[in-house]
Image: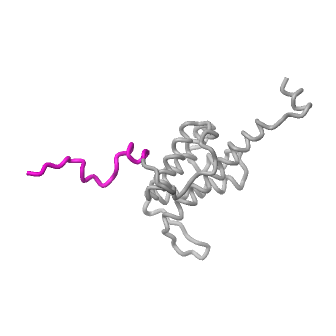
Amino acid sequence: MVRFNQNQFSSQPAPDEMMDYHPIVPKWKSRIKFTLITDGNVRRDFIEAINCFNHGFYNASMVIARRAIHQEMIKRELDKKYPNLYDQLENSGISEKLKKLLQKVKNFGNNGAHPDFCLYDNKGNKLDDVRTFAELSLNFLDKYFADEYETDSMIASAPLSEKERAQKK
């Protein structure tokens, strides 16, 4: 008699197995160093979104990418003033271009989470390419993180002028 482990036929790998698996050539790789993302919750969600994408879980990637920007707004305590993510982003104080990027990430995440949330091209045609949407989510997040964190890091490590030195004292 052949005995089977009840988990042997599970369609999903265990979470720790997914985190240990690294494709030889990742499908998507961040340009920003993760250590520059100072908030651990934001960083973990961004990494999880990348892992989901690289394992072909595109809807999950979009949802977790959206969660990363929600974590960013919580870090800024905007969740206490504004009831939804749209309003939090609009009142975040970031540039208009970055707001538009993050609003798109939010929309992609909504598409990944809600089967009835649709995205359309400029001609009104319904789009359903979840892989492309997930990749755009990661690219947009990477751009945002580079602007927010990498720029701050570059400025902080740059030499100071005499006037800047005096202002620090």
In this rendering, the answer to whether 119 lies above or below 148 is below
From the viewer's side, name the closer residue of 12 and 93. 12
Which of these two is toward me, 124 or 137? 137
Asked whether residue 14 is drawn in magenta, I would say yes
Whole-percent x, y for residue 23 in the image? 46, 54
Outermost residue, right side: 162
Q: Main secondary structure of the magenta part?
A: loop
Specify start and end residues of the magenta stretch as a single range.
1-20
Q: Quadrant of residue 135?
A: bottom right
Which image quadrant: the C terminus?
top right
Q: How is the image coloured?
A: one colour
* 36 drawn magenta: no
Q: Nearer the viewer, residue 115 or 48?
A: 48
- As drawn, 162 above or below 60: above
- Horizontally, is 73 left or right of 48 in the view? right
Residue 158 pos. (x, y %) = 80, 38
Q: Residue furthest top?
A: 169
Q: Residue furthest front?
A: 24
Name the residue rendered at 56%, 45% in the picture: 70
- Which residue sits at x=53%, y=66%? 119
Q: Residue at x 85, y 34 (%)?
A: 160
Q: Is residue 38 above or below residue 140?
A: above
The picture places residue 71, in percent across and down from the top left corner, at 56, 42
Q: Could you tell me residue 112's position as x and y percent?
A: 47, 58
Question: Is 103 in front, or is 157?
Answer: 157
* Image point (59%, 36%), residue name: 39
Q: How many marks?
A: 0
